[in-house]
Amino acid sequence: MEIAFLLYPGMTALDFVGPHEVLCRLPGAVIRRVSKQPGPVKTDSEVQLIAECGFGYAMRPDVLVVPGAASATDMRDEPEILDWVRNAHAGTTWTTSVCTGSLILGAAGVLSGLEATTHWAALDRLLFMERNQRSRGWSKQAKSLPQPVYLPVSIWLCSWPRS
């Protein structure tokens, strides 16, 4: 199972590290850390994460994880990121986000018509972007799993039947 994590400047390290620590331990999991270009990506706390793959790397992940950031709303002005998210989402079994990562999913248009949630302080931005309704906790609909925290859906994905 291929799991892709979107890395972008200013993202929150914990929103990546938490799900990564859970999902990388799945039997057969192949983790891809993806950014516009391969190389270091500086988080909002100055931690540098390494993206092994750039957007040009041909991949069809089974799971896409989009971490959040205080600056996640700014990603609506990053068409290259939004295009990559849309393209990756088209082939996933599950697309998920942590906290305000759902704002990136919303800006990419992959939450249209779905119930979604985000950090409470960003909920108005998500509602404005996609006209979504708020859910309680995390929301499991279709193949999109936006969530305010990383642990519940990471554990749920561990129980997802794999072939």
Image (spheres, helix red, strand yellow):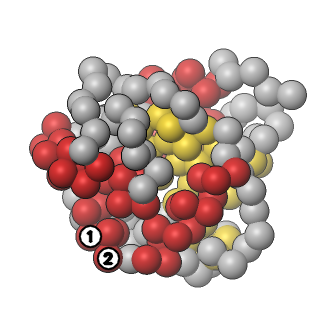
Front in this rendered view, residue 156 or 20: 156
Q: Residue at x 83, y 37 (%)?
A: 28
Residue 129 at x, y percent in the picture: 25, 54
- Up/down of 14 relative to 74, above or below: above
The answer to whether any part of residue 3 appears in the image is no
Front in this rendered view, residue 37 or 39: 37
| Residue assigned mark 2 | 77
Q: What kind of element bears circle 1?
A: helix
For the C terminus, the quadrant is top right
Mark 2 packing: few (<14 Cα in 10 Å), some, or many (20+)?
few
| Residue assigned mark 1 | 74
Q: In the visual, does 43 lie left or right of 30?
A: left
Mark 1 packing: few (<14 Cα in 10 Å), some, or many (20+)?
few
Front in this rendered view, residue 126 or 36: 126
For the N terminus, the quadrant is top right
Front in this rendered view, residue 87 or 37: 87
Residue 35 at x, y percent in the picture: 55, 71
Q: What kind of element bears circle 2?
A: helix
Q: Nearer the viewer, mark 2 or mark 1?
A: 2
Q: Residue at x 74, y 56 (%)?
A: 60
Q: In the visual, does 108 lie left or right of 155?
A: left
- Up/down of 113 relative to 48, above or below: above
Q: Are marks 2 and 1 in contact (CB under 8 Å)?
A: yes
Q: Residue at x 68, y 58 (%)?
A: 32
Q: Residue at x 69, y 34 (%)?
A: 25
